[in-house]
Amino acid sequence: MNKPLPLAGAAALGVAALLAACANPPGGSPTAVATPARLSPATGATLQRCEALAAQFQHPATRIESAVPVAAGELKLAGQPVAAHCLVKGRMNERRGRDGRDYAIGFEMRLPQAWNGRFYYQGNGGLDGAVRPAEGALGGGPLTGALVQGFAVISSDAGHTGAQTPYFGLEPQARLDYGYQAVATLTPMAKAMIASAYGKGPDRSYIGGCSNGGRHALVAASRLGDQYDGYLIGAPGYRLPNAALAQLWGAQRWLPLATAGATVKHPLNPNASIPDLASALTAAERETVARAVLQRCDALDGLTDGLVQATQACQATFDPARDVPTCSGARDGRCLTPAQKSALAQVHAGGRAANGQPIYSAFPWDAGIAGSNWATWKFVNAVALDPLSVGTVFTAPPVGMVDPAKADIDALLAAVAATDAIHRESGLSLMGPPGHEKPDNLLPLRARGAKMVLYHGVSDAIFSAEDTRQWLERVNASQQGRAADFARYFPVPGMNHCSGGPATDQFDLLGPLVQWVEHGVPPQAVKAQARGAGNPGGVNTELPAAWSAQRSRPLCAYPAVARYKGQGNPEDASRFSCQ
């Protein structure tokens, strides 16, 4: 893990002073990086046509299947009615693939009757393959989203159907569409449709998503930097092939510790089974690790409240070998064996090839290790989903479904970086943003006034929050220490992959992003709420019993940490400051 940024003295700084210090480091050269331009606010318009789009809208390689009005209240979000809008469904680039199957980029657009002048590209997660409702909703149990806020929103399947998921990676164009070309293809079409529907194109364009959707947004920042003004990037798996290989590598560490012969149902195939890796580190044992993390790190932010806000300080403080009780006899859930501790430490370190090459970034120690989503990714998806994505989507040539127990990780590391006569881009290339190792290609995006907001659950078990933090540090280095002028990162303590875990995981970062892009107000602290009993977005059943059902905390722009002011209700975000 990279050395954490020094936080000494941060408690004496206000957020503005802290961010100014980050933007103008001693010895830096701020004048070498242009001051970002100021973008004007969007202006709205009224929908002029809906049904007529089916026959009248023309765009290359595009077929509109339907365009129908949706009355106010027909669609709801968190129980609240969504305003009247037009729902357009269509397909782009219909063709017969090299594998003899039919492919296309399926999409839907939702065009509000009362439009705010903005366009939002909704990046979906996983292996895509489904056209999800174009709501633009993000965060745990979302209460709002782009559509509710008046955006025109597009959603797509990224170039293949769910039924094609087991083999779309064998078709080179479908693989490229999944990587980045579907976004590049749909973006100009969507803007043209908006112009046809409203009589004007979007004044401001935004793209966002979480997980693979966050990767889509981060890749778009590098490849389509002139097409979007705001990028909302959640848990970006921008090194997805590396993360998937780290999962396989981890599975090989858990297997010897799992109950021999024990299996569970395959999550996608009820007629198949997978090894019960969860028996290698049970829920009770993960709770024991979480308690040990809290004992060492909870108070580092000034308040013992079940959340580790001082993430970077915790990494230097917590040692599983020392801090987690060691079993002196049989496993009883209250301790770990030396073998368990060793496997856990290795998996958290991100894995290494035989020659010592890191496979992926380390994962931060955090109390969210007790979350069920953490276990799902480490113990189920590692042997059910990652073998498929690695073997059919990321390797060249495709090697087919990988046996996680026998996978040659070193050979697969080479295969995800390889090309062949059919697959002319490697898995690493087509999935990641170009130049992410030295992201100075973002300078033009920054200069014209575009902004990026990133967020990541600290206890994400598949895409590491540390990988996102390190990316931001590289951006900062490439911009003479002034990345905060256009990019800010909000870690979410306790949160698992995109939501869940013992966390305040319900928040809206789209509104603050718009304020930053169009009004020059940078986000510094964003309120996040726990989803306790009665929450209209859905209850998070993993909240600790001691928490208020309405607990709230500020999400602080890194490297600031939420610290209790020392008085008032500790369940209320207003009693904390980002320092």
Image: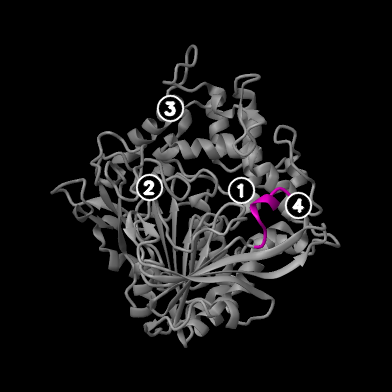
Say which amino acid is labelled 3.
Val
Dot 1 corresponds to which residue? 243
Q: Which picture quadrant has residue 277?
A: top right
Tag 4 or tag 2, which sits nearer the N-term? 4
Residue in the foreground of this view, choosing between 104 and 186? 104
Q: Which picture quadrant has residue 444?
A: bottom right
Asked if residue 351 is positioned above or below residue 189 in the image, the reply reads: above
Q: CA distance from mark 3 to mark 1?
A: 26 Å
Dot 3 corresponds to which residue? 324
Tag 1 or tag 3, which sits nearer the N-term? 1
Tag 2 or tag 3, which sits nearer the N-term? 3
Q: Is residue 64 visible?
A: yes
Q: Residue at x 36, y 50 (%)?
A: 505
Dot 2 corresponds to which residue? 493
Give the label, 1 or 4, closer to the camera.
Answer: 4
Give the label, 3 or 1, closer to the camera.
Answer: 1
Give the label, 3 or 4, closer to the camera.
Answer: 4
Q: Residue at x 48, y 67 (%)?
A: 476
Tag 2 or tag 1, which sits nearer the N-term? 1
Horizontal side of residue 55 vs 111, given as left or right = right
Which region shows up in magenta? 159-167
Dot 4 corresponds to which residue? 395
Q: CA distance from mark 3 to mark 2?
A: 20 Å
